Each structure stands twice: as C-alpha cells, then as structure tokens.
C-alpha cells in the first residue's frame, strides 16, 4: 500500500513537472489598467461593443517605448487614455520590450510563426515580414473612408509608406526632422560656427580638437544611429545623385562614389574626432557623452530635446548651451517613420475593428499632441497645431521646425531606406574601418553584398 | 514484475513525451528543413544539398565561425580543464585558505552569462574601464585600448571571458577525489612518494573518467556559447569573434534564411557528436578500469 502511494505521488510529481514546463512557454505580458480621461467612443466601436456583449475585446500591442525611453511617458499616457475611453469595450494588452533591439528580435521570431501582436511598430523590416507572412492589413481603404483620421495623418505620411501597388501597410505617428545639436559654449571657445560645407565641417572638427574638445558623439554599436545620421547627411547633400540615393528605399548598390566618399569621411571621424569609447558604443553612451558636456556635436532628432533639461540625464543648465543646425550644404533629414502596422488579417471582424480603433487612436490628433508635448516628436501635419506657447517653451524644437523651411536637401535615414542586414553590417565592420583594417571601398562592398543577400 | 513494468512505463511517459515533442520533433524538423529554402512569406521548396554546399563553398563568414569554434573547443578542453584540475589538486591539500579559494574560484560560475558579459564590457571599456585606468596608472601613459573590438585583441579578450573560470571542473574533480580511499594515500606515503608524485602517478590516473567528463562539458559548452559574445562583440569586429551559434543566430535573425540556418545547425550538432566521440575515445571512457 505504502509503495503504491509513493508511486502515485511520484507520478503526480512527474505530471506536475510536465505541466510546469508547458506553462513556461506561455507569454508574459503586462496590462495597462489605469484610469483614462473621459471622452466619447466612436460609433464603430459602439457597434463592436454591441457584438461582443459584456466582455471587452482584448487586443495585443507590443512596444519598446518603456522605462527610460524618451517617449515612454507619452506612450503610457496614450495607452491609458485609450483604455479609459474604450473601457468595457476594448482593452489593450501591452507587451513591453526593454530595448529597440529586443523589440525587433522578438517581433522577428513572432513574425516567423505568424503570431505578431495586433498592433505594433513595423520598423527594421518587421512591416515587410508581416506583409510576407500575410498578417498585415492594407490600411488604404480605411484611410479613404475616414476623412477625420486622414486629416491628421496627411497625404505626405500616407504616400511615404505606400507600396508600388498602392497599398498602405503602415501609418506613421511622427514626422522626423533631424539635424544636429552642438554645444554653443564649445563652439564659442573654439571660435567656430556651424559649418556650411563638409570641408568646413572637417576643419571645424580639427579646430575643436585643437581647442581641447572632443568634436563628435559617435557610436558603432546597435544600429550605429548617431554615426549613420552623419553618413546619411554626407551622402544626401553630396549632389543630386547622392540625394536621390538617400531618398531611395533599398537601393541597388552601396558602391557609389558619394557613398564611398562619405564612408571615407566617417573613417576619419571615427579615428580622429570622437570619444575613445565610440567603437562599440550604443546610443546611450553617445547621448551621455553629449549631455554630460564631454563632446561638441551629436546628430539626432528633436525627441532628444526634453533630455537636455532633465538633470538626471544632462548636466545642470545644459539646455541653454545647446544649439541646433542644418547639416553642411543645407541638408536635413526629413522623413516619416515606418509607423504602426495592423496585423489582424487572420482575426475576426470584431477584433480587426477593435485593433483598427487603437491604431487610429495611436496615429490620431490626440496621440500626436501627447507625443509632441511629452517627447518632442513632431506631428504629421500642420493640422495638429504647435502653439506659440509651446515654441517659446521648446526653442530647440521651434528652431528645428524653422530650419526645415531653409533646407536645400532633404532625405531619409539609412534605417528607413536599407535592409536590416545592411544596418547590421555597419555595426560589424565600423570597428575595422576605424582601425584601418578595411577601406571605405571594402565596407561599401560588404554593404552591397548584404543588400544582395536580403533581396 | 508485470505490474512493475506498467509503473515504469507510466513514470517514463512524461519524460518520453517531453523528449519527443521538444527535442525529437525539433530535430526532425531541423534536419528536414535544412534541405529547403525556408524563409518568411515564401513557399517552402526542396533544394537538396544546396544549403550545405553554399555554407562550405560560398560563405567565408561560416568558415571563420567554424574555425573559431574549433579553436575555442581546443582551448577550453585543454587549458580550461588543466586550470580546473590544478586548482582542485591544490585545494585537496586542505590548507587554511582552501575553503575561501574554492568559494571565490566558483563565483564566476554562479553569475549569469549576461551579467558577466556586462561586467567584462564595463571593465574593459576603452574610456572608463578599470583595466585601461589601471594600465594608465602603472605606465603613466593614457591607455585607450579597445579590448573587445580591436582586431588584435578581440579574439583573446573574448576567450578570457570564459577560459580561466574553471570552477565547475574544480568542484567535479574534488568530488571525485573525495572518493579515493585514504589507504591509497597512506600506501604512497609509506612507499616514499612525494605529494607531486602522488598526484601524477596515483590521483590523476584515478581521475581519468571525471576529467574526461569535464573535457566533454568544456568542449560542448563552446558549442552553446552565444550570450557573452552577443553582450560583448556580436561576433565582430568583422567576423573575428564569430562562432557557430552566433552565426546560426545571425542567419536566422538578420537574413531570415531558416533553411540555411538549419543546415548550419545540423553542422553544429555534427561537430558536437564528433567532439564527443573523440574525447570519449581519448579518455577511454567506454572502457572498464
């Protein structure tokens, strides 16, 4: 009897272990449950709610705008506002990923098993994967039938993400105007002004170095963001061919004279004009070097502005020391983000409608306003008003908007225009470029090879 | 007996099911799909040996990865194990410091690889890292060596993040040493053997099986090394610190070529099986003492 009981206990333990292992495979996610401001739900949502009786429809949403991310506060406010507005009808279940990289990697895995969340940002090729696996929904018909939504999205953002066959699989919630920030005190001490040409820019770097300042906050880790903004600017302002190249999605080759010349300049910048930790550094290292007053220039967008007056990130009074400028040759990165995709092609009509409501909310006037206010993110159209009061309180953002009108060359970022594999190659080979182990021509050919392999 | 057989089957069933669904099914899919051009959003089609031919003839990165993996297997199964066994022999002398040293030596083994990666990354930061600061203090010259991403230092810096930390080997060997009868040591002492002679001629031969096991563990750990490389160099600069697991990861997540990645995975498994066979033969692990 005793033996039999022991065997039964052992069997129960074995079964429990199996169940525990199975349980480990389930998805962990966090929910946003806080109260939201009282506003009215739309008629479509009322219909959705009527279909689903008392239980709210749950839609899944993944985000990397959490923790110390510059847009974390805005993201939380928008999600909370949505859940409040649609309380009892739609509930957004949020999965938080700690970094951009973690987000992209997780979404790539989910895309391969056709289980992407209902709504997510389609950056770094995720949108293309969602289109390929059949989860992405064409948003063009919805934009056409909702004039109010379209008013705040605008033709520019819609056309930016339109495919050759006239479909729109993603909607941005921000316009990006990216120049570079500089430390006015260091410029003044070195006796220089923002450069008008690239030759003058390189001379300025040397002048700053001679005056005892480190000129540039560069990085080669992650997507080499701050370094590649300079690279994009050099190519995009080189001449008309270079500008066309930087306005082309997935170009045929990187073996172009403008690109190779720009990589040559980047090599000099990495070797002579940046911090010792730039090789292998991630964005936070580069940002920290600038915000702590260690370097004179960083290429980045206006979403960085709130950090300049945040004393947990920047030295006290730093915001007053920062200026913003166009790239040499009057260049400015001006683009729309890839934005949000709707991955509900295989879901029920009610779920599709609920997810669409959330996507509209995330890209609508309210969300654009919150992101402008809290994260310094520029709205898609002029229909979201940027008040004089806001401009007075945020002079750098106001200046960026003003500079946009003076730009001779506008172009996109490499992150938006290149395959993810190409971007990975930068992180892989920039150290070798900086240490003179490969040439600019070599790097251009490695990028072209990765480009070919991605087609 | 018949009744017992029923219970044996019942007890084994959860384990067999787990193995079948988690490992066996995965292996079958892995092997089968390595002969296809599997990627996202495209119809799966059979490509025969194309993936295998491609990785060995057209993929310089894969060849570098396989070469690095073999070097690391060799280093880990020799130097790493020698360090672990040497420390075990030293600690077996039971001096006043033995317990403290054993604990300290094992610390790197209880820290997660991700945390260890961050620790090394910070210690070897070219600008603010402890190592460069120390070198600067000693030499009086500013040192900004980029240990992890300099082309001459990267491979050996990554190697040093795991090679010396042989706490597991030490613990396993010490556990086996405790099973040696005191009579054996006493007999050696009566015969006039020095402690070193006892170690080399008595203890080590008796440790053959456990040392073989340690070599297997050390070698196969190099076939799983991904986390520290991801945290520190991601296989760079270029492919200088690329190994097989990292290359498979890159093929999957950067290029989304699952068929090719699975062919690489099969090669990885084959390398593991070959290593296992060679080590077992070298240590005569299948033979009775």
Image: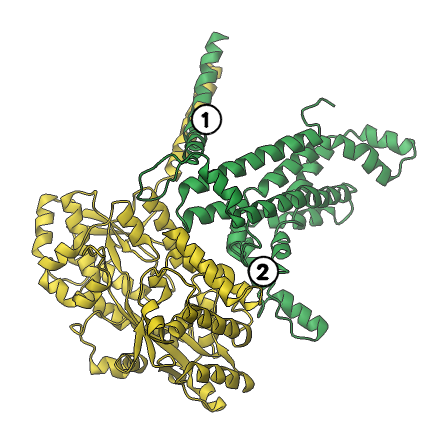
Chain colours: A yellow, B green
Question: Residue B80: which quarter of the image?
Answer: top right
Dot label at residue A135? none
Vertical relation: A237 (above or below) A368:
below
The mark that comes first in sequence, 1 or 2, is: 1
Q: In the rendered structure, are the residues bearing label 1 and label 2 in contact, judged by CB atoms less than 8 Å apart?
A: no
Residue A230: where, in percent of width, then height? 41, 73
In this orientation, does residue A428 appear? Answer: yes
Chain that bears disc 2? B
Q: In the figure, is residue A334 to the left or right of B258?
A: left
Which residue matches tag 1? B15
Residue B16: where, in percent of width, then height? 45, 24
Chain that bears disc 1? B
Question: Residue B274: which quarter of the image?
Answer: top right
Q: Nearer the viewer, residue A238 or B285?
A: A238
Helix, strand or loop for disc 2:
loop
Which residue matches tag 2? B148
Label 1 environment density (alpha carbons within 10 Å; few <14, some 14–19, many ≥20):
some
Residue at left offset 65%, top offset 49%: B163
Residue at left offset 69%, top offset 46%: B102
Q: In the figure, is residue A166 to the left or right of B170?
A: left
């Amino acid at each position: 009897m005793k033996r039999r009981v022991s065997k039964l206990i052992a069997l129960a333990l074995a079964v429990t272990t199996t169940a525990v292992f199975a349980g480990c495979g389930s998805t962990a996610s966090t929910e946003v449950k806080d109260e939201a401001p009282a506003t009215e739900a739309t008629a479509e949502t009322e219909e959705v709610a009527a279909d689903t009786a008392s239980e709210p429809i749950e839609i899944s949403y993944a985000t990397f705008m959490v923790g110390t991310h510059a847009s974390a506060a805005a993201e939380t406010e928008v999600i909370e506002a949505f859940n409040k507005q649609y309380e009892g009808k739609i509930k957004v279940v949020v999965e938080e990923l700690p970094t951009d990289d973690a987000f992209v990697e997780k979404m790539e895995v989910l895309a391969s098993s056709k289980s992407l969340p209902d709504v997510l940002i389609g950056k770094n090729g995720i949108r293309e994967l969602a289109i390929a696996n059949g989860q992405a929904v064409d948003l063009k018909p919805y934009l056409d039938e909702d004039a109010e939504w379209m008013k705040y999205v605008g033709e520019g953002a819609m056309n930016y993400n339109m495919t050759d066959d006239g479909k729109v699989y993603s909607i941005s919630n921000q316009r990006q105007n990216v120049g570079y920030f500089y430390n006015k005190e260091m410029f003044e001490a070195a006796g220089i002004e923002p450069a008008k040409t690239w030759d003058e820019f390189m001379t300025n770097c040397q002048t700053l170095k001679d005056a005892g300042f480190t000129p540039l906050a560069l990085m080669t880790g992650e997507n080499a963001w701050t370094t590649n903004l300079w690279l994009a600017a050099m190519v995009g302002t080189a001449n008309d061919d270079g500008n066309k190249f930087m306005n082309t999605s997935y170009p045929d080759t990187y073996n172009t004279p403008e690109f190779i010349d720009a990589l040559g300049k980047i090599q000099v910048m990495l070797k002579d004009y940046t911090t010792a930790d730039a090789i292998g550094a991630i964005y936070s290292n580069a940002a920290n070097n600038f915000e702590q007053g260690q370097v004179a220039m960083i290429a980045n967008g206006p979403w960085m502005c709130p950090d300049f007056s945040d004393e947990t990130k920047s030295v006290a009074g730093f915001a007053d020391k920062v200026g913003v400028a166009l790239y040499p040759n009057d260049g400015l990165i001006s683009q729309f983000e890839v934005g949000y995709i709707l991955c509900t092609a295989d879901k029920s009509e009610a779920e599709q409608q609920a997810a669409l409501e959330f996507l509209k909310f995330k890209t609508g006037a309210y969300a654009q306003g919150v992101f402008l206010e809290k994260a310094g993110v520029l709205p898609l159209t002029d229909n979201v008003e940027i008040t004089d009061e806001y401009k007075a309180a945020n002079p750098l953002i106001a200046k960026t908007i003003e500079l946009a009108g003076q730009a001779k060359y506008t172009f996109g970022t490499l992150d938006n225009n290149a395959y993810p594999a190409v971007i990975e190659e930068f992180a892989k080979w920039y150290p070798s470029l900086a240490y003179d182990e490969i040439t600019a021509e070599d790097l251009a050919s490695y990028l072209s090879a990765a480009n070919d392999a991605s087609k | 007996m018949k009744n017992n057989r029923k219970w044996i089957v019942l007890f084994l069933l959860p384990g067999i099911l787990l193995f079948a669904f988690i490992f066996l099914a995965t292996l079958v899919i892995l092997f089968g799909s390595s002969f296809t051009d599997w990627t996202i959003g495209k119809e799966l089609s059979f490509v025969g040996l194309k993936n295998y031919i491609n990785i060995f003839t057209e993929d310089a990165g894969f060849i570098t990865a396989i070469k690095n993996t073999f070097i690391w297997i060799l280093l880990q199964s020799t130097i790493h194990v020698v360090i672990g066994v040497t420390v075990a022999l030293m600690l077996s002398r039971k001096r006043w410091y033995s317990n403290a040293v054993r604990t300290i030596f094992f610390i790197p083994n209880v820290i997660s690889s991700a945390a260890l990666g961050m620790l090394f990354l910070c210690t070897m930061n070219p600008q603010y890292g402890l190592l460069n600061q120390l070198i600067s203090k000693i030499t009086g010259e500013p040192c900004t060596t980029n240990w992890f991403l300099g082309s001459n230092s990267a491979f050996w810096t990554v190697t040093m993040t795991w090679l010396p930390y042989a706490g597991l080997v030490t613990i396993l060997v010490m556990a086996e040493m405790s099973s040696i009868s005191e009579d054996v040591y006493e007999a050696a002492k009566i015969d006039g053997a020095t402690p070193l002679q006892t170690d080399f001629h008595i203890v080590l031969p008796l440790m053959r099986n456990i040392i073989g096991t340690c070599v297997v563990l050390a070698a196969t750990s190099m076939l799983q090394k991904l986390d520290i490389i991801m945290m520190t160099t991601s296989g760079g600069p270029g492919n200088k610190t690329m190994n097989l697991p990292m290359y498979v990861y890159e093929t999957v997540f950067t290029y989304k070529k699952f068929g090719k990645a699975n062919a690489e995975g099969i090669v990885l498994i084959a390398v593991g099986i070959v290593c296992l066979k060679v080590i077992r033969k070298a240590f005569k692990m299948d033979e009775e003492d």
